[in-house]
Amino acid sequence: MQGEELRQKIKEVMVDELMLDYKPDEIGNRTAIFGAHGLGLDSVDALQLVVALEKHFGLKIADSGAAKGILENVETIAAEIEKSAA
């Protein structure tokens, strides 16, 4: 799975696993996941997201430094999944 299909699946996982008050189609590929100008998720959500990404996509995020860059938005998550699958 890659491209737009992958990005859509990531959005669906985020909405389902984090119980977001958004529909997957309302989340842009480059919408910030954290912070007031994005989805507004917090550190607890980040942990849940890391677990969900490993469960659904086999993506292992080793440390918090790496997580900060990977969990920026749907696009950065998708790029990391595509890179790890290659």
Image: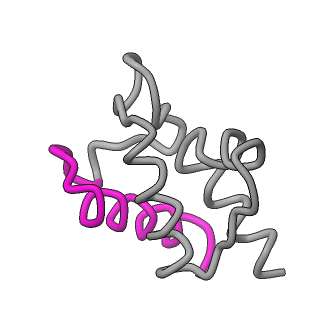
Q: Could you say where residue 68 lies in the image, as x and y percent from the top left?
A: 67, 39
Question: In the image, 57: left or right of 17?
Answer: right
Relative to 29, residue 16 above or below: below
* Closer to us: 77 or 27: 77
* Residue 27, picture quadrant: top left
Q: Where residue 4 appears, x then y in whole percent?
A: 52, 64
Residue 41, picture quadrant:
top left
| Quarter of the image where the C terminus is located | bottom right
Secondary structure mostly seen in magenta is helix
Quadrant in which the N terminus is drawn: bottom right
Q: Is residue 81 above or below residue 27?
A: below
Q: Is residue 66 left or right of residue 56?
A: right
Does residue 21 show up magenta in the picture?
yes
Residue plotted at (69% across, 46% down): 64
Asked if residue 7 lies in the magenta stretch, the reply is yes
Q: Position of residue 72 (x, y in %)?
A: 60, 39
What segment carries the magenta color? Answer: 1-24
